Image (cartoon, helix red, strand yellow):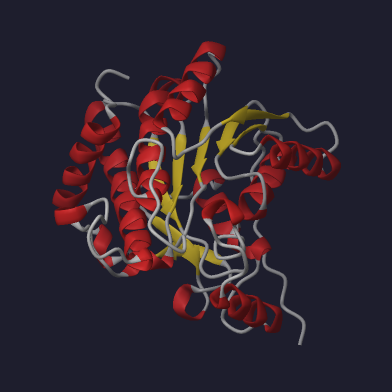
Amino acid sequence: MPRKPIDITLPGLSGKRAVVTGASDGMGLGMAVRLAAAGAEVILPVRNPRKGEAAISTVRQAVPGAKVSLRSLDLSSLESVAALADALRGEGSPIHILINNAGVMRPPSRQTTADGFELQFGTNHLGHFALVARLLPLLRAGGARVTSQVSVAARRGRINWDDLNWERSYDGMRAYSQSKIAFGLFGLELDRRSRAHGWGITSNLSHPGVAPTSLLAARPELGRSQDTPAIRLIRAMSARGILAGTVETAKLPALMAATDPDAKPGVLYGPSGPGNLGGPPAEQRMYTPLRSSEEAQRVWQVSEQLTRTSFVRA
């Protein structure tokens, strides 16, 4: 039986500047296309220039006349994050939408970032944390909405405070969950602090459910030479319409959270089908590991120390 089409309508975004991390392929690229089609100027910060140029071509083919451009960004390097932020601040244009979408998942063995952090924690959370901190003046100027992409993996697990870098007894899945829990706690704390300090930005969370994206596919740069059994199963389920969504539907919660005039700050958006794995996007019940404001404050403080960034000085 063919799937029932699932989609949302984006508001007009002419005059808005949007930044989407992880937009060289998959969900992020789909988000970039939709934002450009709605009239936004779209910035794609990418690690791989070749994939970035291909993404730009895809956007322009889908949206003739699209305002879209590349920037260089490797979220696993705080130096690269600072360079991008300096470049964008040098341009001086306000940012109205920031979708923190990029991420890595379950490398076959423990790896570290350029700064010595466990790869998933350093890329998925700390890289984005530092990026938002350094872009804060532009976000404030644009009255921005910041949407941070978490994962169903943040439903359970905890922050491994005794060993944030997983130097002992490394578990790739638990480390991934930690990275997404920390990232979600940051996104919620960002909204609380913006309201408390009058920054004028709003922040919410999204998750894509389960879909056949590239996260668990072959990633030679991570040391993964072939697709994982998990992604093969997800592809089969998605193709048959069993629980899992598609790459096309998986991008919708983030787009809703980032652009819908009625989307709320401090809220999680995701698929509304069985198990919240697929289906139309909607507001979700907040995951239990993301509900503690005390834990969020601790994540914030540690992240400022580790990344050597401060929202006060931004």
Looking at the image, the residue that sits furthest to the bottom is 1
**Residue 62, quarter of the rendered image:** top right
In the rendered image, the quadrant that contains the N terminus is bottom right
The answer to whether residue 285 is seen in the rendering is no
Residue at 54% in and 32% down? 73
The answer to whether residue 146 is seen in the rendering is yes
Residue at 25% in and 38% down? 303
* Residue 305: x %, y % from top left: 21, 32
**In the picture shown, does residue 213 fall above or below 92?**
below
**In the picture shown, does residue 285 fall above or below 143?**
below
Q: Looking at this view, is 208 or 78 the one in front?
A: 78
Task: Tell how many labels.
Answer: 0
In the rendered image, the quadrant that contains the C terminus is top left
Residue at 66% in and 43% down? 32
* Residue 311: x %, y % from top left: 28, 26
* Residue 266: x %, y % from top left: 34, 49
**Residue 197, quarter of the rendered image:** top left
Residue 259 is left or right of residue 55, and the answer is left
* Residue 246: x %, y % from top left: 65, 68
Q: Looking at this view, is 218 or 85 the one in front?
A: 218
Q: Looking at this view, is 121 or 250 the one in front?
A: 121
Residue at 68% in and 35% down? 49
